Image: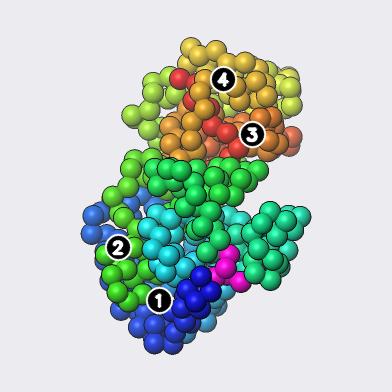
Amino acid sequence: MKALAAGIGVVVLSPILIASTGIMLIASADAMQSNGSFASCLNGIDSDEVADQVAKLLDGASGKDVHVDGLDLPDEQVPNAQTIVAAGLSLDIPAKGQVIALATAMQESRLRNLATGDRDSLGLFQQRPSQGWGTAEQIRDPIHASEQFYTHLLKVDGWQQMTITQAAQAVQKSGFPNAYARWEPLATALQSAIAKTFPGDAADKHTAQTTQSSASCALGQTGAGFGFIPAGSVPAGYVIPKDADPRARKAIAWAMQQLGTLYQWGGSCTDAHGPDPMGRCDCSSLMLQAYAHAGVTLTRTTYTQVREGKAVSASDLQPGDLLFSRGTAARPEHVGMYMGAGLVIEAPRTTKPVRITPIKDWSILAVRRVL
């Protein structure tokens, strides 16, 4: 294994490899478009642009001159992503496994080799010496950390059939189990671009597939494409999805009529535009009344609504699904409604109005489908 790790290090740092990345990364971008499906699902992520920017950085450009959505320190983050992909290739990990690893490192450390973290968590994946991931020094070695992640992933029964976030959570056992989903589009674009820079059959065997499921497309909708959304407004271009359940369409439409009304803890949401503050909405009463106007009965509080309907994956959202955040998955403290197109409508908190926010800003603890 040490010999293998040393080999990865040579591959990652090879000047010859870095000098030749430009042409190969452009080829990678063409390959991403060949089947046409997944690239078009990457809301806010342009895979061609990611490939171009990564190529510039690996060819010696300054990180100040490189911009990749989701990466604020590309000169540090892209080489770390390259190491993760290199480790996966050397261990013959399929492309999906490499995407899982990248998405995990993005969530845990933003692809930075951190010297600190929660309790004794360290490194790219925030692995803990006390949990058997290696010594502190080993965990701070990106090659060791990547190999350890892949070793644990391969022990997860059926990981290749799981969603990206389910597989990542099976390894990490995070307190925020659905947080990895938001990084799948960028992780896929990075993996495809970087894998093409390696010699051999990586282009054919280890490049992320473009024929993804509709669930993956839905996951790619982060809401980032709408840009800044003023509080209480509807983002330009948004329409309630025509293929949504008619009851969900009614619930979303009613909730949108409450946009701009101030939050009121304990408010009934029965007269949000009226003079009585207690007629305004809090997060759970907004959900209750929206669905009541669609003929669906919900319980009153966030704590009970999290047990309504059935649990579904954050990678398979449908308009009308209830999204829960803050607190814990068993006892969340906030709820909003998914509107489609990567957007959520919510009554956020005291002094804030009912508003629409991009799902990328949510740390989702649970999802319930009440239809």
Q: Earlier in the sequence, mark 3 or mark 2?
A: 2
The answer to whether 338 is drawn above or below residue 267 in the figure is below
Q: Secondary structure at mark 2?
A: helix
Q: Give the mark nearest the N terminus, 2 or 4.
A: 2
Amino acid type of the residue that numbered disc 1 sits on in the rendered structure: Ala
Q: Amino acid at mark 2?
A: Lys
- Rounded to the nearest angstrom, the CA distance separating label 4 from label 1 is 48 Å
Q: x%, y% of residue 116?
A: 73, 63
Q: Is residue 42 left or right of residue 109?
A: left
Which image quadrant is residue 24 in?
Answer: bottom left
Q: Quadrant of residue 88?
A: bottom left
Mark 1–mark 2 distance (CA, rounded to whole Å): 21 Å
> How busy is the neighbourhood of tag 3: few (under 14 within 10 Å), some, or many (20 plus)?
some
Q: Earlier in the sequence, mark 4 or mark 1?
A: 1
Callouts 4 and 1 close, C-beta under 8 Å: no
| Mark carried by residue 55 | 1
Residue 159 relative to residue 279: left or right: left
Q: Nearer the viewer, residue 110 or 269?
A: 110
Q: Nearest the camera: 178 or 200?
A: 200
**Residue picked out by circle 4:** 308
Question: What residue sits right under mark 2 in the picture?
Answer: 205
Reading the image, the residue beneath label 3 is 329
Q: Residues within 10 Å of mark 4 (few under 14, many from 20)?
A: some
**Residue 199 location, quadrant:** bottom left
State the quadrant of the C terminus. Answer: top left
Instruction: Report the span colored magenta.
Output: 140-145
Please tell me whether mark 3 sits on a helix, a strand or a loop.
Answer: loop
Q: Is residue 211 visible?
A: yes
